[in-house]
Image (spheres, grey):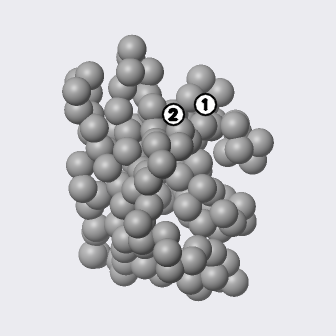
Amino acid sequence: MSRPSDTHSIEQTHPASDCDIAYVGYRQSGQAIVEKRPGQERLTPERSLALVNHSPSGFEWGYGGSGPAQLALALLLDYTDDEAFALDHYQAFKTEVVSQLDCAGSGERWRLTGPEIDAVLHETPGEPVAPSI
């Protein structure tokens, strides 16, 4: 994902204190759960569904479908708190990050930190940045 050149750049959309934020995904009773840490606040699809309805049944990850698209939009919307920025960038974020997240078993988790999100949003073409899985 190339560095945004529009008026909705990541520098304008999130405060520096967000470097402590991390999103953690796991499965509970077969359902995909995403928490925002610190605080274990559960990320839900409702806010992102109000913008684009890809997956009313919830989030997914690990492939390029509708559940991962909903998660990518929700992550960027929550992290940046900027609807226009999230809408402009979530499909690329889905392809580069969310489709690569992996945790199939009940005890497995993925973790995506604020600095990792920033790195993906600022990367130059040809320089992929993988999340810490």
**Residue 11, above or below 39:** below
Residue drawn at point x = 53 percent, y = 52 percent: 75
Farthest-out residue, top? 29
Horizontally, residue 36 falls left or right of residue 24, namely: right
- Residue 7 screen position, x and y as percent: 69, 84
Dot 2 and dot 1 residues touching (CB under 8 Å): yes
Q: Residues within 10 Å of mark 2 (few under 14, many from 20)?
A: many
Q: Which mark is residue 55?
A: 1
Q: Dividing the image into 4 quarters, which one contains the N terminus? A: bottom left
Q: Which residue is mark 2?
A: 59
Residue drawn at point x = 29 percent, y = 58 percent: 131
- Residue 22 screen position, x and y as percent: 40, 56
Image quadrant where residue 4 sits: bottom right
Between 117 and 40, the residue placed more toward the observer is 40
Horizontally, residue 121 falls left or right of residue 58, namely: left
Horizontally, residue 1 falls left or right of residue 80, namely: left
Q: From where the camera sits, is residue 54 visible?
A: yes
Q: Secondary structure at mark 2?
A: loop
